[in-house]
Amino acid sequence: MVEIEKSKEQENKENLLSKPDFVSQHRCFVAIDFPKEIREEIIRVQSELKKKNLFHGKLVEEENLHLTLKFLGEISAEKVEEVKKKLKDVKFSEFKAYLGELGVFSPSYIKIVWVHIIEKQILELQKKIDEKLSELFPKEERFMSHLTIARVKDVKDKKIFLEELGKIKVQNLSFSVSGFYLLKSELTEQGPIYSILEEYPIQVKI
């Protein structure tokens, strides 16, 4: 029996394929989570929005409510490890943030309904994350801290929708931000499923 020696190219290809973690892609983002009382207020607001029956679309599930600081897209497991290391160097102090008003990005093209999250230190934290990951990803050109509460497919009447949206009042509740997360998103027919890859608590205590 004659053995045929594998070429170096074949060998390298087989080695890569035998390491699924190296070649697999993960849809990742960096985000802030919300405490129970904030989630309860958002659920109340979502319920009020749903009762008005103004659009076709989907409310964001309670377990998926978060504030995205940076979307990383589809990245390899190898790059995930690089991201984990760089995010460990982000230093910040605990701070308070507040729920703001409901809004949309474009009145003429309504695709998302959000709640504004108010606090300048969120912007500062986002910039620090952007800076630490600048060797791996482009910096954000525009960032507005918001919590997406609904994804819109179609609006029955844009004028009425915006008028009624303005009537829904969000309680100006505060919450503490003492850390952020690196999350993975798996897209399914039922919607995205998020899982935590790494948690980053505060680095500076005051």
Image (cartoon, helix red, strand yellow):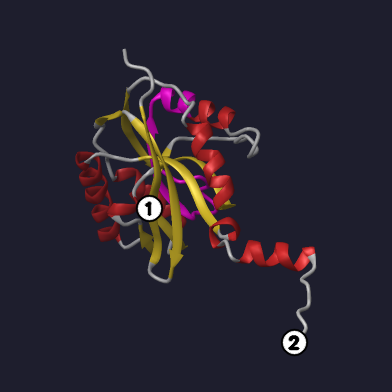
Most foreground residue, 92 or 113? 92
Q: Which mark is residue 195?
A: 1
Q: Is residue 140 left or right of residue 104?
A: right
Q: What amino acid type is highlighted by mark number 2?
A: Met
Q: Is residue 55 visible?
A: no
Looking at the image, residue 70 lies above or below residue 203:
below
Name the quadrant containing residue 91.
Answer: top left
Q: Which mark is residue 145?
A: none
Reading the image, the residue beneath label 2 is: 1
User: Is residue 198 rendered magenta in the image?
Assistant: no
Residue drawn at x 58%, y 56% as measured from the top left: 22
Name the quadrant containing residue 136.
Answer: top right
Instruction: Indicate which label's residue lies in the foreground, 2 or 1.
Output: 2
Most foreground residue, 176 or 178? 178
Residue sitting farthest toward the front: 1
Residue sitting farthest toward the top: 206
Q: Which structural element holds mark 1?
A: strand
| Distance from Cα at disc 2 to Cα at disc 1 | 51 Å
User: Is residue 120 rendered magenta in the image?
Assistant: yes
Q: What amino acid type is highlighted by mark number 1?
A: Ser
The magenta stretch is: 103-125
Looking at the image, residue 134 lies above or below residue 115:
above
Residue drawn at x 25%, y 45% as measured from the top left: 39
